[in-house]
Amino acid sequence: MYQKILITTDGSSVSQHTACAGVKFARQMGAEVLALFVAPEYQYPVYVEIVPPAYPSEEEYVQQMKRLGEEYMGSIMRAAEGCGLKHACMTAFSDAAALKIVDVAEQQHCDLIFMGSHGRSGWGQLLLGSVTNKVLSHTTMPVLVHRLIREPGT
């Protein structure tokens, strides 16, 4: 049914748990896995006239974010490899993560976006926004939202 599944991660524990579930789902489908980490764009220090010496250059920032992305996506890659699935990972840069996720899914010809939800509701969701909700509102592609089931009292 699905040939190529995009699994997103932001490095959080919820995201890592979701990624493992995504790989299991891909194994059931016999689908290829594309892991994606979206890092924020480089921000120049606009509040000072001279760039502080400790402030990373744009090149250093990009390399640091790529290393971080590889670290976050490492568990996805190891799990996919262990399942014998074709897999790849990608770090993208955007201040609009949801739009970048949709763009990458379309450009890479994915059939499904598999992502998690932190489970915020009410004011928390309204104030913080939700990358998952934004993805859902900007794509016609199927999106499978994985939610952690929490035990009562945790």
Image (cartoon, helix red, strand yellow):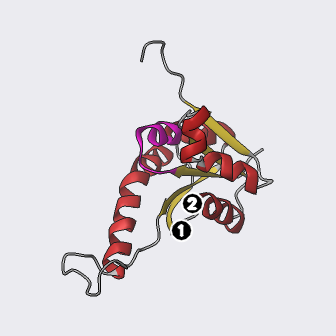
**Horizontal and vertical percent for residue 145?**
65, 38
The segment highlighted magenta reads: 9-19
Q: Nearer the viewer, residue 77 or 133?
A: 133
Q: Which residue is mark 2?
A: 97
Q: Position of residue 36 (x, y in %)?
A: 53, 58
Q: Which residue is mark 1?
A: 94
Q: Give 105 or 76, whichever is nearer the viewer.
A: 105
Q: Is residue 35 above or below residue 130?
A: below
Image position of 87 with respect to 147: above or below: below
Mark 1 lies on a secondary structure that is: loop
User: Residue 72, image x and y in percent?
Assistant: 40, 52
Q: Amino acid at mark 2?
A: Ala
- Quadrant of the image occupied by residue 65: bottom left
User: Given the image, on which type of amino acid does mark 1 rest?
Assistant: Ser
- Inter-mark Cα distance, 2 to 1: 6 Å
Please identify the residue farthest to the left as the structure is shown: 53
Q: Is residue 10 magenta?
A: yes
Q: Look at 50% across and 21% down and name the residue there.
A: 150
Q: Residue furthest right?
A: 140
Secondary structure mostly seen in magenta is helix
Q: Foreground residue, 49 or 102?
A: 49
- The answer to whether residue 15 shows anywhere in this view is yes
Q: Quadrant of the N terminus?
A: top right
Q: Which residue is drawn at the image coordinates 30% and 81% (left, top)?
A: 57
Q: Is residue 103 above or below residue 115?
A: below
- SS assignment at label 2: helix
Please give the label number shown on residue 62.
Answer: none
Q: Residue furthest bottom?
A: 50
Q: Nearer the viewer, residue 80 or 108?
A: 108
Q: Residue at x 34, y 64 (%)?
A: 67
Q: Is residue 100 left or right of residue 62?
A: right
Instruction: Left or right? Give the position of 8 relative to 143.
Output: left
